[in-house]
Image: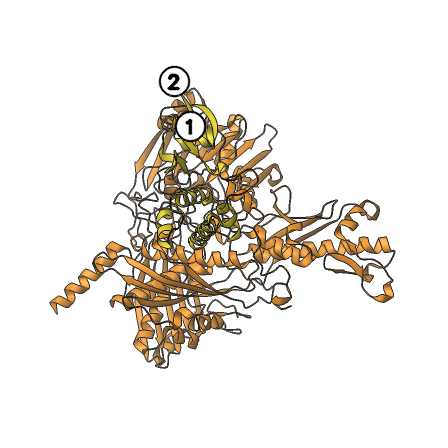
Amino acid sequence: MAKIHVTTTINGAPTEFLCDANQTLLDVLRDTLGLTGSKEGCGSGDCGACSVTVNGRLVCSCLVLAPETEGAKVETIEGMADGERLHPLQKKFVEMAALQCGICTPGFLVASKALLDRNPNPSETEVRFWLAGNLCRCTGYDKIVSAVMEVAAEMRETVR
Amino acid sequence: MSKAQYKWIGTRPDRPDGADKVTGRARFGADFNLPGQLVGKVLRSPHAHARIRSIDTSKAEALPGVKAVVTAADFPDQPNQIVPTGEMQVNLRDITRNIMAREKALYEGHPVAAVAAVSDAIAKQALALIDVDYEVLPHVIDVAEAMKPDAPLLHEHLITEGVNPPPTKASNIAKRIEFKKGDAAEGFAQAEVVVEHDYTTQAVHQGYIEPHAALASASEDGQVQVWSTTQGHFQVRGFCSRLLNIETSQIRVTATEIGGGFGGKTVVYLEPLAIRLSQKAGKPVKMVMSREEVFRASGPAPGGNVHVKIGAMRDGRIVAAECRVDMQAGAFPGSPVGPACMCSYACYDIDNVHIVGFDVVSNRPKVAAYRAPGAPISAWAVESSLDILAQRLNMDPIDLRLKNAAKKGTKTAYGVTFNTIGMVETLEAIRDSEHYKAPVKPGYARGVAAGFWFNVGADSSAAAHVGEDGSVTVISGNPDIGGSRASLALMAAEELGVDYNKVRPVIADTASIGFNFVTGGSRVTFATGLAVVNSVRDLIRELKVRAAKIWNVDPDGVMWENGMAKPAGSNVGEFEPLSLAQLAAQAGRTGGPINGHAQLNVTGAGPGFGVHVVDLKVDHDTGIVGIGRYTAAQDVGTAIHPSYVEGQLQGGAVQGIGWALNEEYIYNTKGRLENPGFLDYRMPVASDLPMIETILVEVPNPSHPYGVRGVGEVPIVPPTAAIGNAIARATGIRMTDLPMSPPKLSEALDSAALKIAAE
C-alpha cells in the first residue's frame, strides 16, 4: 500500500510525514513523530487521553485519520508550554495536585485550554461538562476542576 | 514532635515529577522504544471454557516478517507452589497457565499464543494464521452456579482447602475460611433486634487509563532488560525469573511512569511473553494491550455474594454478627475473600462474631487486587445492614456506629488487637462536620457508611547520596502512582533539615537499589518512607563522622541540626557549623563518597478508618442518581503532603461511586464479556460529580517516626453503602444488588410503585 504524503503544521512547526491511509493521527504523532505526550487509553474516543486540537477544534486524535490533517494546524501537549515557561494551566495543575498518576493529564490540559480559549469565564458545571470526555481514574476530578476554575479567574484578572 | 514543629511535613510543595507530567515529557509504559524492536501481539481464546486439543503455528511462522511465535510449550511448567504477589497469593502452577493457557482456555480472552513481527499489521495477520483446535466445554460465570455440585469444573485437581475432612471430589470451591470470636449463637439469643439480608456485587475493573505495556530485550548472553508499567518492578523480575527459569540478577526491570494501577498492575501478563518472544527472535519486543484486552484479560476485582446477620440490643449495642462471603476468584484460586471477611466487622467492637468465606473459581479472568481488595464487597453488605438496623432502632447512623466503634484495645474477629486507631475520631469528625450538621436539601436524602483497611508494611530499601555540591539524591524502588516522590522527599528534607528542593527523589531499576515490595497496600509513604528516613539517618551518622574527622573530635561530639554539623556541646570545642556543601567538598579527605543506606522489613502499619456521607437525589423516571454533596473523612495518620492525601480520598470515593452506580462486568450466555470498553463500562466522568469534600483526621501511627498511616485504600470502602443507604432513605427502597444503575433502580422503583398501586 502506497504511503500518503501529508504536509501539516504541528505546534507551529511545518511538518511532513508519510502515513498509511488507515493510520490515526495519534499513531503518527506517537510512532512517526515521537510526540508521545498524547496517550492512548482506549483507541475509541472514550477517554480523551489523546486530546489534541486540529484547526482549533478539540478532538480525540485516535479518531482522526492522519491524512485528514493535510494543511491543518495541529496543537498537542508538547506545544503548550512557551519555551521554559509553563502555560498557567500546566503550572496550576502541578501547584494544586490536579494529577496523580499523570496519564490523563496531557489530555485534560489540552481540553482545558480549548475550553478557556472559547469561554474565559466558565461555571463549574460548564467545566465539568466540557471535561466529561476526559476520563481520570485517580483524582475524582475535584482538583482538576478547581485548577481550571482558578486559572480562568487568574487569566481574566490578567486581561483586565 | 507536634506537627507545628515540622518544617516540611504537612506542606504542599510542587511534586518533583510535576513538570514532566504536565508537558508530556514523562514516559509511560507505551512510550518506550528500542532500535529494531518488534511488535508483539497475543492470540486470545474466544471461548469461556475450552480444551485446547492442538495449536498449529506453522502458517504464522512462515509469514514473512514474523520473527517468533510462542505457546505454552515455550514456558516451563511450574510446581504447585504459593508465592505472594502484592496483597494476594498466587500459585506458580496457576500463574504460568494464566499468562498462557496450557491444557484449557479458562476464560474469554485467555492467551493461547503470541507472536512477534516487524509491524503491527503483520503481527495481526500472523495471529489470524494460528490454528487452534478447541473442544468447547460448558462454562460457568456465576459464583452461586459455580458452587453447585454439578457445575462445569474448571480444574480437575481442585480440592477445597479448609474443610475437614477434605472433600474427595474436585469442585470449583478452592477454599473455605472462617473467623470466630466469642459465641455468635449465644449473642443472637440475647439480641433484641436482628437484621438479616443477602447482598450481591458484580466484578468491576480498576479502570486505570493506561493499558498494560512492556518492552523486553533479551541478549544472546542470557541477560534481559524489561521496561514495564507496573506497581512493582521487583515483582515483575521475580515472576519472570520463576516463569522463565532465569536468575533474578540476569533480569533488569525498569518501572516506567505508571498510568494508574489500583492493585491491577501487581501481576504479570505481558512481561514473560515479551521476554520469551525476544529470546526467540533475538530482537527487542514491545507489547501493548488494547483497552478491550485490558477488560477481557487483566484482573478485575471480583464480585461476591454476601449474607449478613446482625443482632443488637435496643440501645444500639451490637451483640452478635455473622457474615458469609462467596467470592469470585476468576479462573484460578485466589480471590481476596480473606480480607473481605477480616474487614467485614473490623470497624466495630463486637463480642460475638462468626465469619465464613469461600473462594470460588469460574470462567472469568483471574481477579487482581483493587484498592482494599475484598473490603468494599463485605462493607457494602455490613454497612447497608447497619443502616437498616439504625432505621429499625430509630437511631442516628453515626450514633449507632459510635456506640459500637472499634478503639485502642479492641480485639478483631481475625485476632489482631488494635493499637492507636482513629475510628471514633473519624465518626466524630463527620458528626461535627458542616455537611452533617447542615439540613438535607429538599428532594435529597443522606446516607453514611464506614470502611476499614489494614494497610501494609513489608520490604523496602532506600539510599541517600550526597553529591559533590552538597545536594542530595534519595533513591528508592517503588513506582510513584500518586505523588509518592513528593512525600518521600518531604520526609527526607525534614529529617535532614534541608530545603525540599535540595532533595531529588529517584526511583531506581531493579539492579540499582535493593529489593522493594510492590507499590500497594498503601505502603509506600509508610514503609518506603521509613526506609528513606532510615537511609537519611544513616547518612547523617556518616556526615557526623566526617565532621568529627575535620574537627578532630569524637563523632559523639557532633550533632546534626538544620542541615549542618555542629558541636554537640561547649565541651567539644568552638567550631563553625559545617554545611552539607562544605562536608561534601572535603569528602575526598574524610573517607570518600558520603552515602546512607537502609533496608527493612517494615511492620506496624497503622490501620485506617473512613466515614463517608453523601446527599443525593433519585430521578424517579430514569433511576438516575444525582450526587449533591459528598464528604469523606479518614484517619490518615500524619498527612505528609495533604493535597495528595486529599486526592486519595477523593479518587477512592469516586471509584466507589462508580462501583455503586454504574460499573459492572456484563456477560452474555456464551460467557463473553459484553462491555469491554469505556463507552459501555461506564466510569464516573466530571459531569457526574460534585466536589468531594475531605476531612483529614490526623491520628498519628505510633509505629512510624512521622506518624504515617497508609491512606490509599480505605476511601473506596464506604461509598457503595453510603450511596445505597441514601437511596433507601430517598425512595424507601433498599437496594441489595450492585450496581444501583439507572435500569436496575428504575425497575425497583417501578415495581415498588406497582406494589403500592395494587395495595
Q: Work out which residue is located at the far front of the displayed protein and give it.
A: A160
Chain letter of the residue beneath label 2 in the structure image? A
Judge the density around disc 2: few (<14), some (14-19), many (≥20) Cα neighbours within 10 Å. Answer: few
Q: Nearer the viewer, residue A81 or B378?
A: A81
Mark seen at residue B213: none
Q: Write down the colour of chain B.
A: orange
Disc 1 or disc 2, which is closer to the eye?
2
Judge the density around disc 1: few (<14), some (14-19), many (≥20) Cα neighbours within 10 Å. Answer: some
Q: What residue is disc 2 on?
A: A2
Task: Answer with left or right where residue B758 lies relative to residue B723.
Answer: left
Q: Nearer the viewer, residue B575 or B275?
A: B575
Quadrant, the N terminus of chain B? bottom right
Quadrant, the C terminus of chain B? bottom left
For mark 1, give the secondary structure.
Answer: helix
Task: Answer with left or right where residue B670 lies relative to residue A144.
Answer: left
Do pointers 1 and 2 mark residues of a single chain? no
For mark 2, give the secondary structure.
Answer: loop
Q: Work out which residue is located at the far top of the displayed protein and give it.
A: A2
Which picture quadrant has residue A115?
Answer: top left
Q: Nearer the viewer, residue B606 or B168?
A: B606
Q: What residue is disc 1 on?
A: B120
Which picture quadrant has residue B490?
Answer: bottom right
Which picture quadrant has residue B492?
Answer: bottom right
Residue B22, position as x, y percentages in the image: 51, 44
Q: Write down the colour of chain A.
A: yellow
Residue type marked 1: Asp
Q: Is residue B159 above or below residue B726?
A: above
Residue A126, position as x, y percentages in the image: 35, 51
